[in-house]
Image (cartoon, grey):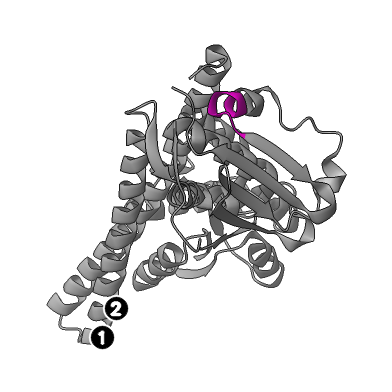
C-alpha cells in the first residue's frame, strides 16, 4: 500500500484522538447517569430508614434506567474495541456497510452536537472489500464531517453502502448545501492522501446533493 | 434556592433535579440551550448548572447569553472531559472552581451552589 505516510500518519493520529475523546465523553455521560440513579436509590434507602414509604415502581424505574445505561455503555465499548483493532492488520476483508455503520455510531455525538441526523440505509446484501480498515474509517469520517456541513436546512445526511461492478461505494445524499461550498477545497490534502492510499475515488454531484466514495474490491498491498 | 440544570442527557438532568428536590432545592431542567434561554426569561434562578458541550450553542456561549438576560445568575459548569484547556476556558468565564467533572458528587455541587449565592450576597 503506497501513500504519503507523513500526511496519513498525522491525519490518522488526529482521527484516533478525536474519536477517543468523543468515546470517553460518551462513557462519562453513561457513568454520570448511573451515578445519579444509584445516588437516588441511596436517597430512597435513607428515606425508607426514616420511615417514609417508597413506591416500588420508583425503584423499578431507576433500576431499568441503570440497566439501559449499562447496555448503552457496553455498546460504546464494543464499538471502541472494534475501532481500536482496526489498526491490527494493514489489509483485511471488511464489510463496507458494517464499517460505515461503525463510523456512523462513532460520529453520532458530533452529528448530535451539530443538530444533524445521520440516516443509514440498510444494504440489500453484504458489501465485502479487502482494504486497510483504519484508513477506510478515517476517509469515511472526513467525508462525513464535510457532508454534515453541507446539509443545509434539511440537517440530515443519508448514507448507503452498496456493491458495484468493480467493488463498492458509499453514497452520501441530501447534501443540499454542496453547491454553496464551491470555494472550499474538498477533497483537501488529507482526503487526497487517503483516497490514494485506498485506491478509492470521490465523485461530488452538486446538482443532486450527493457525494460518492468508490472502492476497488481489493486495495493493493 | 432555585436552580436551572442544562445538559443534553435527559436522564442525567431529570434525575439530578429529583435528587436536588429531595434536598429542598427547587430545580428546573432542560436538554436544550434554546429552552434554557426561554426559562430564564420567564423565571428567576439563583444558579445555572450547564454542560460544557450543549448541542448547537455550546455551554460557554449559552452562559454568555443567559448572563445578558439574567446578570445576577451564577454559573457552574459540568463536563465529561475535564481537560486543562476546558478548565481554563470555564475558569475564565466564571471563577476558578466553578467546574465539576462528571460524574459529579451531589454534595459538592450543592456546596458550590451555596458558595456562589453567599458570594453574591456578600458582594451585591
Mark 2 crowd level (few <14, some 14–19, many ≥20, 10 Å Cα): few
Please state the horizontal and vertical placement of residue A17, each as a whole percent of the image. 46, 30
Q: Residue furthest left?
A: A49
Can you say whether A137 is above or below A112 in the image? above
Q: Which x, y percent locates residue A18?
A: 50, 34
* Local SS, label 1: helix
Q: Which residues are magenta?
A: A194-200
Apparent side of residue A173 relative to residue A140 in the rendered image (left or right)? right
Looking at the image, the residue that sits furthest to the front is: A165
User: Residue at coordinates 81% horizontally, 51% vertically from top-left?
Assistant: A177
Q: CA distance from mark 1 to mark 2?
A: 6 Å
Q: Position of residue A147 (x, y in %)?
A: 68, 47
Q: Which mark is residue A186?
A: none
Task: Using the rendered view, name the quadrant where residue A34 is placed.
Answer: bottom left
Q: Which residue is mark 2?
A: A61
Residue behind mark 1? A57
Percent coordinates x, y for residue A35 in the rendering: 29, 57
Q: Is residue B83 above or below residue B119?
A: above
Tell me if A40 is positioned left or right of B76 in this view: left
Q: Secondary structure at mark 2?
A: helix
Query: Most prominent secondary structure in the magenta stretch?
Result: helix
Question: Same subunit under labels 1 and 2?
Answer: yes
Amino acid at each position: 500500500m503506497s501513500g504519503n505516510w507523513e500526511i496519513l500518519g498525522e491525519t490518522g493520529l488526529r482521527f484516533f484522538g478525536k474519536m477517543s475523546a468523543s468515546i470517553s465523553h460518551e462513557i462519562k455521560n453513561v457513568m454520570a447517569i448511573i451515578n445519579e440513579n444509584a445516588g437516588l436509590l441511596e436517597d430512597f434507602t435513607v428515606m425508607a430508614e426514616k420511615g417514609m414509604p417508597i413506591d416500588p415502581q420508583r425503584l423499578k424505574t431507576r433500576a431499568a434506567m441503570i440497566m439501559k445505561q449499562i447496555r448503552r455503555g457496553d455498546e460504546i465499548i464494543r464499538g471502541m474495541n472494534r475501532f481500536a483493532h482496526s489498526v491490527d492488520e494493514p489489509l483485511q476483508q471488511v464489510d463496507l456497510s458494517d464499517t460505515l455503520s461503525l463510523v456512523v455510531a462513532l460520529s453520532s455525538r458530533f452529528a448530535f452536537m451539530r443538530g444533524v441526523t445521520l440516516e443509514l440505509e440498510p444494504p440489500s446484501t453484504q458489501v465485502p472489500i479487502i482494504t486497510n480498515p483504519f484508513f477506510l474509517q478515517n476517509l469515511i469520517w472526513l467525508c462525513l464531517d464535510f457532508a454534515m456541513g453541507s446539509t443545509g436546512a434539511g440537517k440530515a445526511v443519508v448514507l448507503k453502502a452498496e456493491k458495484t461492478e468493480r467493488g463498492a461505494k458509499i453514497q452520501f445524499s441530501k447534501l443540499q448545501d454542496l453547491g454553496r461550498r464551491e470555494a472550499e477545497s474538498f477533497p483537501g490534502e488529507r482526503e487526497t492522501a487517503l483516497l490514494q492510499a485506498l485506491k478509492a475515488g470521490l465523485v461530488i454531484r452538486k446538482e443532486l446533493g450527493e457525494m460518492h466514495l468508490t472502492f476497488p474490491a481489493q486495495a493493493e498491498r | 434556592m432555585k436552580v436551572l440544570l442544562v445538559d443534553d442527557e435527559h436522564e442525567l438532568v431529570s434525575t439530578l433535579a429529583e435528587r436536588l428536590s429531595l434536598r429542598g432545592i427547587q430545580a428546573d431542567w432542560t436538554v436544550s440551550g434554546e429552552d434554557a434561554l426561554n426559562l430564564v426569561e420567564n423565571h428567576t434562578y439563583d444558579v445555572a448548572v450547564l454542560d460544557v458541550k450543549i448541542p448547537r450553542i455550546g455551554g460557554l456561549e449559552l452562559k454568555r447569553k443567559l448572563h445578558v438576560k439574567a446578570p445576577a445568575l451564577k454559573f457552574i459548569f459540568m463536563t465529561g472531559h475535564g481537560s486543562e484547556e476546558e478548565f481554563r476556558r470555564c475558569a475564565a468565564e466564571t471563577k476558578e472552581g466553578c467546574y465539576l467533572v462528571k460524574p459529579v458528587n451531589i454534595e459538592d455541587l450543592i456546596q458550590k451552589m451555596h458558595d456562589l449565592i453567599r458570594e453574591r450576597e456578600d458582594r451585591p
